[in-house]
Amino acid sequence: MTWKIRRKVLRLIMESAKSSYPDEFGAFLRAKHGIIYEIVLLPGTLSGGRSVIYNLIAKPIDFTIVGSVHSHPSGFPIPSGADREMFARTGDVHIIVAHPFTMDSWMAYNRDSEQIEVKVID
């Protein structure tokens, strides 16, 4: 599948990551027909300087939730071991945004932690 993300959603993600800095920001991604159009914030999510802990019991049963997004305040959008484990369990597309949280400082991965392309659309 070729994934796409709305530019306004990516901007919202970047602004949310900046607002959370120096802690991580985390949310889930909602898509329809391969287009990511919304983020989903889970109640009870805990953000810290080195991780985001999701309250997965609060994650709705919703097949439009296709993956996750989180920030890396360190500046490196490379998945950690914990990221890889989460990717394998929580969807098909995952985005990591890195400090300084610009439209060029992010990468996307599939559930196997392989880098994939996600096209930004208006």
Image: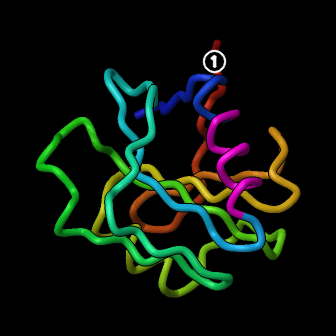
Residue situated in front as seen by the camera: 97 or 120: 97
Residue 55 picture location, percent across and down: 29, 71
Quadrant of the rendered image containing residue 13: top right
Quadrant of the rendered image containing residue 6: top right
Q: Is residue 119 above or below residue 52?
A: above
Report crowding for label 1: few under 14, some 14 to 19, many 20 or more residues within 10 A (C-alpha).
Answer: few
Give the residue displayed 33% in from the left and 21% down from the top.
33
Q: Is residue 105 above or below residue 2?
A: below
Which element is circle 1 on? strand
Asked whether 27 falls inside the magenta stretch, the response is no
Give the residue displayed 45% in from the left and 30% down from the top.
36
Residue 84 picture location, percent across and down: 47, 77
| Quarter containing the C terminus | top right
| Quarter containing the N terminus | top left
Residue 117 picture location, percent across and down: 61, 41
Q: Is residue 31 above or below residue 84?
A: above
Please state if 22 lies on the left or on the right of 94 as rendered: right
Q: Residue furthest right?
A: 100
Most common SS among magenta residues: helix
Read off the residue under disc 1: 121
- Residue interval drawn in magenta: 11-20
